[in-house]
Image (cartoon, rainbow, N blue to C red):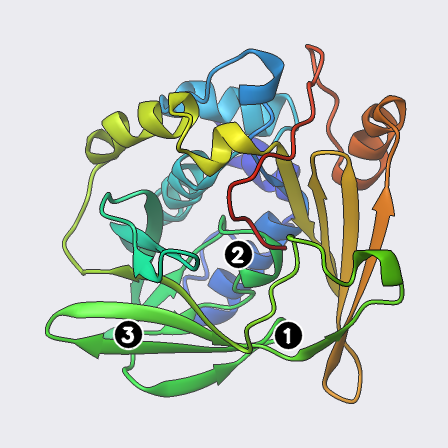
Amino acid sequence: MDLEAYFQRIGYKNSRSKLDLETLTEILQRQIQTIPFENLNIHCGESMELGLEVIFDQIVRKNRGGWCLQANYLFNWALTTMGFETTMLGGYVYNTPAQRYSTGMIHLLVQVTLNAKNYIVDASFGRSHQIWEPLELISGKDQPQVPSIFRLTEENGIWYLDQIRREQYIPNEEFINSDLLENSKYRKIYSFTLEPRTIEDFESVNTFLQTSPASVFTSKSFCSLQTLEGVYCLVGTTLTYRKFNYKDNIDLVEFKALKEEEIEEVLKTIFGISLEKKLVPRHGDRFFTI
């Protein structure tokens, strides 16, 4: 694997040796703006692999995306190869309908230590819940970013990531009640501990998430990519674009219902993805907001 190829993939052209917060922030932003958060392999009859070589080939050489277990694993590899002090962590994602965190550790995230300060850097949660900057590991501090205000809170050794969201304006009236819309101003995202993890800790859940009928990832095909001002999301055959804070502390959310024959071109032009096998788009009934 070649670090320079990764840098070329994300369009990073600055220092390779400057290990500071500015560099970390730029690499995070470059990755989330070029590498989609997506699970399309599942809906093309292929698997989501965890081997680093396979992930590198998929994301870097084939210009694809991946889900957190893949994209954050690659992100951690790149940061570590550069010389950053990193720790992989495991998260429990909040299930809004059930009003509880997942019982299984289903999210991979990364901690980076810089000048005795710890930061959470997560390059693959996607949608409007994606952080755009490293979050300093301080309990109870509001950390405003372009997508929203994020807040980390620690209780008895468990950390919680929450989000304070803006109001949203949906000009497409037929989509005002869409199940894809996040309607809560205060959104719980996930919990985690600071216990170091390895990729082997995620092998069983990686299999579960792509095979179980109870998984949102088998229920829905999705792809999301951050832009300079917002985020695109494709769920099934529904394409959305959210422009953050387009006016008066309000997000603009635009919907477009695609014909199945339009999806291939949308994936190429908006997400930079060319699939090798036919995608069967799916919009199941599992909870998933954009």
Decide if residue 236 is on the left or right side of residue 263.
left
Q: Nearer the viewer, mark 2 or mark 3?
A: 2
Q: Secondary structure beneath disc 2? A: helix
Tally of marks: 3
Identity of the amino acid at label 3?
Answer: Asn
Residue 196's x, y, as percent? 16, 50
Q: Quadrant of residue 285?
A: top right
Decide if residue 89 is on the left or right side of residue 142.
left
Q: Earlier in the sequence, mark 2 or mark 3?
A: 2
Identity of the amino acid at label 2?
Answer: Leu
Packing grade of label 3 (10 A; few <14, some 14-19, many >=20) is: few
Residue 248's x, y, as percent? 78, 89
Identity of the amino acid at label 1?
Answer: Val
What residue is shown with label 3?
A: 115
Whether 78 is drawn above or below 218: the answer is below
Q: Secondary structure beneath disc 3? A: loop
Residue 11 in view in this figure: no
**Disc 3/disc 1 C-alpha distance (Å):** 25 Å
What residue is shown with label 2?
A: 28
